[in-house]
Amino acid sequence: MERLEFEMFANEILSRLPTKCVARLRCVSKQWRYELSSHLFAIIHYCRMANNPYRKVIMLTKSSIDIHNLIGGKLDISSRKIISFPVDTHLSNLIILASQYGILLMCIQWRPNELILWNPTINQFLNLCDKKPKIFFDLRKDAVGIYMDSSNDLKILLLQRRKDDVIPRVYSRNTCEWKTLTFLKGADYASSLYWWSSGTLCNNVLYFPSPHYWTPAKSYTIAFDVESETFSKVSIPKCTDVIGRQTSFLKIRNTLHMFIVGKTPETNVKLYKFEDELWSEVSSFTNVKLFYSFDSWRNKLAENKGDTWSVQIDRCGIFEIQFGLKDFQYFHDAETFQGLYNVASYEETVVSPI
């Protein structure tokens, strides 16, 4: 009875405390550590913290891993904090693939066998590929996504493209095992002509941009329903002037959005949203600036007055979009930041990858 009462106290009272307070309370006693380290408590705490307007942004450079506060959609450069990565590797080898529930899915690109789940707040990590073949993950071909099913089981979806086949595999945190699913029949998405991006979770569906290099009409979005664990194909907005590709999606007010770059005749970036199975244009931006490298973009970051948004377009570089007050208010509710390999937003949570 005493344990049940403490569990209720933890789930109802302590779960409302900030993440750093919870981490300190774990040191009170063995019982406190046990209850505050449970997966159930972590999920309850995350759900309470999910609406917190104060998020973090992690930024990878060649020499450091920087953490910044994200307040009201604006990056606070003065809040910079440097942290270390728990796996021994050169920082230039790291790439952020996905971010969800306060957990980052990282790739060590010169050791493509390695996928690392990492919570930078509590500094716990898990190597997903310890016992897998050498080419378990291929950065050039494969795609990943993070989600949680109705039983609160944290899962990783890995889409492997091997020998003209797409092999979907799902890792379960509860069982610590991988299982293989069935992909769409008759699809040619394993072809090297497609370039996939990591999945974005929205309303229990993971969306994967799968643009075709040369033929925009062949570009689609692959949707994965996390409950039924089935795949479907979603068309992208019909644009005849596309010069870029689909980018990684973003969520705004729990609605899926995407950018498309075009030229008519000047370069423009269009924002679309996906509602009721249809795409509709939200805004079109012509005041854009192109950076050909991450370093050149980052050097200009301190000048950001909070009225820009950056998008990385495959093989085109980084587009910095400048918008007015109306668009800024719209982007204020975005649940992701930037969309660059070296940058990701996340919440501070106690959700453990282990």
Image (spheres, rainbow, N blue to C red):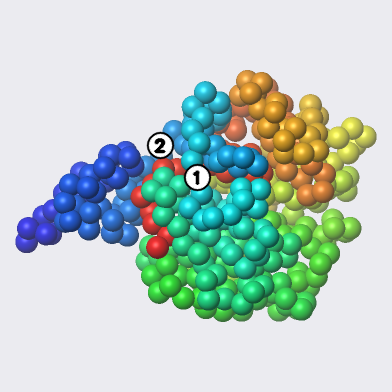
Q: Quadrant of residue 18?
A: top left
Is label 1 in contact with label 2 (beta carbons under 8 Å)? no
Question: Could you give the CA–CA distance between mark 1 and mark 2, rounded to whole angstroms?
Answer: 25 Å
Residue beneath the point at 88% across and 59% down? 215
Answer whether residue 273 is visible to the viewer in this image: no
Q: Which type of secondary structure does the marked residue at label 2 adopt?
A: loop
Disc 2: CA contacts within 10 A as few (<14), some (14-19) or many (>=20): few
Q: Quadrant of residue 298?
A: top right
Answer whether residue 175 is visible to the viewer in this image: yes
Residue beneath the point at 51% across and 30% down? 80
Q: Residue 44: image x %, image y %? A: 31, 52
Q: Is residue 339 left or right of residue 190?
A: left
Q: Residue 192: image x %, image y %? A: 81, 67
- Residue that badge 2 annotates: 52
- Residue that badge 1 annotates: 84
Position of residue 5 relative to residue 58, above or below, is below
Position of residue 315 relative to residue 263, above or below, is below
Q: Is residue 36 left or right of residue 29?
A: right
| Camera-side mark, 1 or 2 | 1
Q: Which type of secondary structure does the marked residue at label 1 adopt?
A: loop
Image quadrant occupied by the N terminus: bottom left
Q: Residue 150: image x %, image y %? A: 40, 64
